Amino acid sequence: MQHPAFEEVSFQHHTDDAEFKRRVRKTTILLSIITIIELVIGLTIYTIHKGENPNHTLVLMFKGMVCILTLAKAYYIVSVFMHLGDEIRNMIMTIVVPLMLFIWFIAAFIWDGNSYKNLRNKYDKHFEETTMPKQHHKVDEHPAEIKTGKE
């Protein structure tokens, strides 16, 4: 009798080609619908930004919806087209856990970079003056009426 850790894990990936083709077709249609919804949301965000008073809460909500839809698309692509949905749990975890660590890694660097930028602007006033955009001042005179000093 062999130790259970060394036993071969065998399972059938696909029952038949027709079932797999149906699954791929269904996933392709679903991904197309999700992409169309993302495009509509993107155009809505663009239209909101073009308005006089953009509603930032609504834009933030739409951007959150786009992130969720993008994660759903990534799940379906990895699950069906890369066949990860047919694998055993341990194989899935060897791919998902490092991915989560990579996402944490990116978020940590963005957070740290933003903190550095804020501290640099707080304590180094010269840097803030040379890199931050200047406020636009309203000109009282018409440009043609500005005196050039050659009178």
Image (spheres, rainbow, N blue to C red):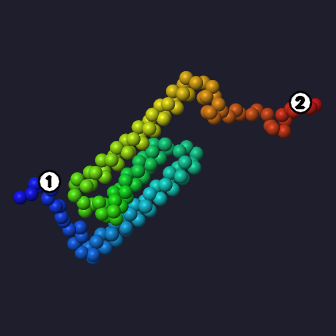
User: Left of 9 or right of it: where is 80?
Assistant: right
Q: What SS does tag 2 mark?
A: loop
Residue type, label 1 = Ala
Farthest front residue in view: 1
> Which residue position holds label 2?
149
Q: What SS does tag 1 mark?
A: helix
Distance in Å between CA atoms under marks 1 and 2: 91 Å
| Disc 1 residue crowd, few under 14, some 14–19, many 20+, Cα 10 Å | few
Q: Nearer the viewer, mark 1 or mark 2?
A: 1
Picture quadrant where residue 104 is located: top left
In the depicted structure, whether residue 130 falls above or below residue 102? above
In the depicted structure, whether residue 39 falls above or below residue 129? below
Residue 127: x %, y % from top left: 61, 28
User: Left of 141 or right of it: where is 98?
Assistant: left
User: Left of 21 or right of it: where is 36?
Assistant: right
In the depicted structure, whether residue 82 falls above or below residue 126? below
Picture quadrant where residue 18 is located: bottom left
Residue type, label 2 = Gly
The residue under the point 30% across, 69% down is: 23
- 26 vs 109, nearest the viewer: 109
| Disc 2 residue crowd, few under 14, some 14–19, many 20+, Cα 10 Å | few
The residue under the point 22% across, 58% down is: 88
The residue under the point 47% across, 47% down is: 59
Farthest top residue in view: 123
Disc 1 to disc 2: CB gap under 8 Å: no
Farthest left residue in view: 1
Residue 76 visible in the snapshot: no
- 44 vs 2, nearest the viewer: 2
Residue 61: x %, y % from top left: 42, 46
Picture quadrant where residue 69 is located: bottom left
> Which residue position holds label 1?
5
